[in-house]
Image (cartoon, grey):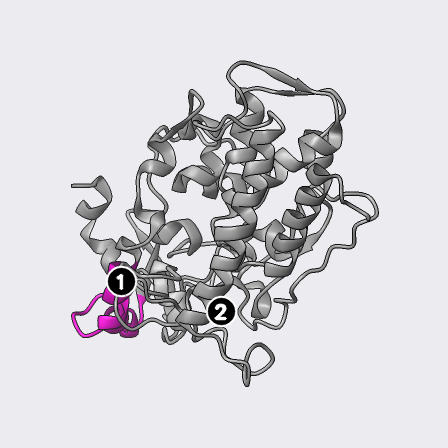
Amino acid sequence: MKRLKALVFIIFAAGIASIGILPGCDELITNEIKDSVAITVIVRDSSCVEYCHSDNNFEVLAAMRQWEHSGHSDTMFYSDTLYGQTALYCGPECHTMDGFVSALNDDLDTSGYPFELWCYTCHQPHTAQADSTWDFSLRTTADVTLESGDVFSYGANGRSNICAECHRLGYNVANQVTIGMLVDDNWLRKIQHAAKEADMIMGAGGYEYSGYTYGSNDHENVIQGCLGCHQDYDEGFALGGHSLNIRDGNGNALVEGCNIAGCHAGDEYSDSRIASEQSSYFLFQLPALRSKLIAAGLLDANTLLPPAGYSVILNADSAGALYNYFYLTGDRSLGMHNLQYATDLLMSSIGFLDGTLGK
C-alpha cells in the first residue's frame, strides 16, 4: 500500500478549494508568559473541526476517492523511465509533490522523499504565510509564459493556470526542429514527453510550415479553463471531479463542460459526436501522416520510431513533419484540446510530404 494512503489525516483535506464552502477558521492568538518565556498560543475556531475533522462531510471524502482514480495518484510519475532517463531525475518539479512545491518557491528540492502528486501538490494546506487564507486555496494562480512566448491565462481568477505549470512544453519548437538536426534518444525523450496540453490549447508548439494558415479553436470562453472540462462533473469517482478524467472505464465521455453558454450550447456535444470527430482525426488523418513518414524513411514500420541509431535530418521541413507526428500523438486528446490546430498541423505535414503543400 502506498505510503501516502497511510497518512489517514489527509482524507479530510482534499478537494476543499474546489468545493468552495469552507467556513472561516478564525484564530485567537495570545501571548502568555511561563517561567519567564513568552509563549504564543493559537486557538482555532470550532468550525475547523466541524468541517474538516468530523465524519459528517462526505464531499472531502469523495474528492480523495476521485483522486485515487486519477493519473496523478500513480507513482509512475517518478519511477517511470523513458529512453534510459528516470522521471524522478528528469524533472522532479513536475513529477513529485515536494519537487513541485519547491519549484514554485524557487527553491532547490532537497527533501529526498518523492511523494506522488496529491492534495498538497496543488492546494496549500494550513501553511502559515502572510497571505494564507487557511482554506486550501491553490498554490498559484499566476499566468504561465510558455516557451513559445504565448501567455497561458485560463479559468476564473486563474484557477487553471496551475495546470500549465507542468502540462506544457519544456522547449521552443524553433530550437528542436532545425536544419541538420540530430535525432537521438535525447531528442526523442523531449518530443515524446506527454506534456503538451497548454500549448495545444493555445494553438502553439507545433511545427508550422511557411505559407500555411493555421487555425485554432477558441477555448477561452470556458469559464474555468481546464477545470471547466476536466472537473465539471463530480458525482461518482471515476469521471470528472478530482479524478480529472474526461472518460471513465466504460467509455463514457464528460460533456457537461462543453454544452454551456458561450461554448456549445445549441450545438451540443455528445459521446457519439466526440467519437466521430476523434475517429476522423485519429483513424484517418494521423495514420495517413504515419504512413507517409514511413515511406519517406523517417519512421520505422515496426517500432514507429525513427530508424535505429542516430540520424541527421538535413531538411527542417522533413524534421517538422516527424516532430508534428510525435507532438500530436503525445497530446493524447485525439484532437479535442484544439481540433482545428491539430488538423492543420496534420494536413500541412501531409501536404509537405506529398509535395502538395501550397498548391
> What is the x, y in percent for residue 178?
74, 27
Q: Amino acid at mark 2?
A: Gly
Can you tell which quarter of the image residue 29 is in? bottom left
Q: Earlier in the sequence, mark 1 or mark 2?
A: 2
Q: Residues within 10 Å of mark 2 (few under 14, many from 20)?
A: many
Residue 189 in view in this figure: yes
What residue do we see at 63% from left, 68% from top? 220
In the rendered image, residue 357, in percent from the top left (x then y), is placed at 77, 45
Where is residue 329? Give x, y as percent.
51, 43
In front here: 204 or 166? Answer: 204
Name of the residue lying farthest toward the bottom: 266
Residue 328 seen in the current view = no
Is most of the magenta stretch helix, strand or loop? helix
Numbered disc total: 2
Residue 162 vs residue 8: left or right? right
Residue at 40%, 39% in the rendered image: 98
In the rendered view, tell whether residue 118 sits above or below residue 322: below
Q: Position of residue 111 (x, y in %)?
A: 38, 31
Q: Name the residue rendered at 46%, 43% in the picture.
A: 101
Q: 281 or 323: nearer the eye?
A: 281
Location of mark 1 (residue): 250
Front tag of 1 and 2: 1
Q: Which residues are magenta?
A: 44-66
Q: CA distance from mark 1 to mark 2?
A: 22 Å
Above or below for 280 versus 325:
below
Q: Amino acid at mark 1?
A: Asn
Residue labelled with disc 2: 228
Report the side of 248 relative to 83 (left or right).
Answer: left
Give the number of the disc on residue 241: none
Callout 1 crowding tier (Cα within 10 Å): few <14, some 14–19, many ≥20: few
Q: Secondary structure at mark 1?
A: loop
